[in-house]
Image: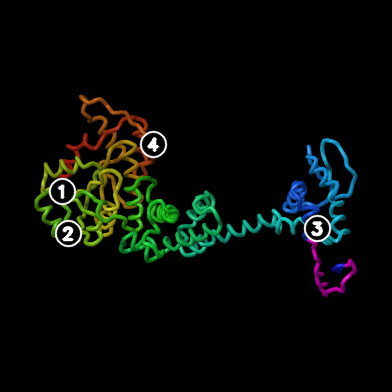
Amino acid sequence: MELTHDGHAAPDGVPEPVAHVTVDVPRLRRLLGVPELEWLVERVRGRLVAGQPLTGAVSLAAPTSGQRSAVERLLARPPGGGRSVTVRLEAVDAVLRRSGICPDGLAAAVTRLTGPVTPAAQARAEEDAAWDRAYAPLDALVGDRPELAAWAARVRADGLARRLGRTPEAVQTLLMGVCAALRPLPADPAVSLAAFAARVLGSAHALDDGTPQATLTLSGIRALTGFADGSGAEWRRDAWASAGLLKDELSSTVLTLNLRGTPALDWMADEGEPSVLTLRQLIRRPPSVASPVVRICENPAVLAAAADALGPACPPLICLQGQPSAAALALLRHLHGNGSDLRYHGDFDWGGLRIAGALLRRVPWRPWRYAAADYRAALTESDTKLPPRPLTGTPTRTPWDPDLAEALADAGVRVEEERELDLLLSDLRGRP
């Protein structure tokens, strides 16, 4: 049953019209809105925000004479003393109602003086709902791309989007752009990053380095493609390229020897000279010939020695020159897709093993004298005139041969690829 404004019962199902209550604002401001009673108004507003009842007493320690006099005027009580002043909230409520200054009492008076009050619980619920709406684009993306579910969960949990956007509205706008960028990736055929951003996000600079949209999109790309963690301009360029977005088609290169399949490569192979292929060349005209076996090395010294020793007779060889570049990955994926059996060799140290592992996550290959038995043989056959070089860095796994990581940890010695040149060249000559 509902009560009418005068306290009588209203018939069931018939809502009582809310009576229009007039607040005497000038008198309210003179009585309760004076600077000397700001402390009292703030205490009442704090209780309203916290959802607490306006009952009981509130006290002010060490009041000024003006604050004490204001309380005495408000409650029409005689002057007092003491080290504090105490006000019962029910008494203030009664004064406001009886005087007609604010017939709805203390809560309505404070709201009229200070503005609408949103209870903290309601504010928290509204904020939680706003953040749920902010992350809604991730839910829609995962519906289209389930493989990004774990990444989307991390974005919700790690707070990066909140730090970048700060407000629910800004985060929602940010994630809408990020999800729009990730949905069509990887791009095939590859496309300019700026052209992609202009087409999908409406601005060629939307994915420029340092923008929140680029930061989160690149995070999603790594989850999508398995691109290894890293930093720096070259790493970012190659990470974009792993999803078919070309930030710079010309500066990403790969070093090769005796690949064939384009007029330029055929001419260089006839001469037995190394070639440097750009990402642009590999995207626009990849080699049309895929050799049955293509060997891969880590260090340029191996490829240079092969060119010097074997020239045109050297079988196809590709050099990573460290971490695999976008150009190297594009070439190796192309060759693997066309039937080439890829064989890899690198440095026997933690850095070399990490490079090999990063490559294996993106392109299948088999070891080329790069297993535990080969490492132990290399230790035995190393030049005794040269002191062993201690192994440094953080250990890593070797999924192509788990025993290899254990062998390195046990021996604690690094063997660089250049120290095995004779053995590698013997393989390239095709004889033991």
Closer to the camera in the image, 97 or 309? 97
Q: Earlier in the sequence, mark 4 or mark 2?
A: 2
The colour scheme used to paint the residues is rainbow
- The local crowd at label 3, few if under 14, some if 14 to 19, many if 20 or more residues have their Cα within 10 Å, is some
Are the two marked residues, 4 and 2, in contact with CB atoms closer than 8 angstroms? no
Q: Which mark is residue 261?
A: 2
Q: Amino acid at mark 2?
A: Gly
Q: Is residue 300 left or right of residue 233?
A: left
Give me the C-alpha separation between circle 1 and circle 4.
33 Å
| Residue neighbourhood size for the residue with mark 1, other residues' Cα within 10 Å, grouped as few (<14), some (14–19), many (≥20) | many
Q: Secondary structure at mark 1?
A: strand
Q: Please, which residue is most extreme toward the left here?
A: 271
**SS state under label 3:** helix
Does 22 appear in magenta?
Answer: yes
Q: Is residue 243 left or right of residue 252?
A: right
422 over 248 or under it: above or below: above
Disc 2 crowd, CA 10 A, few/some/many (<14, 14-19, 20+): some
93 or 138: which is nearer to us? 93
Check disc 4: other Cα within 10 Å, few if <14, some if 14-19, many if 20+: some
Q: What residue did someone put label 4 on?
A: 395
Image: magenta residue range: 6-24
The three-letter amino acid code for the residue at tag 4 is Pro
Query: What is the x, y in percent for residue 359?
Result: 32, 48
Say which element carries label 2: loop
Marks 4 and 3 sit apart, C-alpha to C-alpha, by: 78 Å
Spatial CA distance of label 4 from label 2 is: 39 Å
Kindly identify which residue carries mark 1. Answer: 274
**Disc 4 secondary structure class:** loop
Q: Which residue is mark 3?
A: 27
Determine whether 62 is above or below 311 in the image: above
| Quarter of the image where one finds residue 181 | bottom left
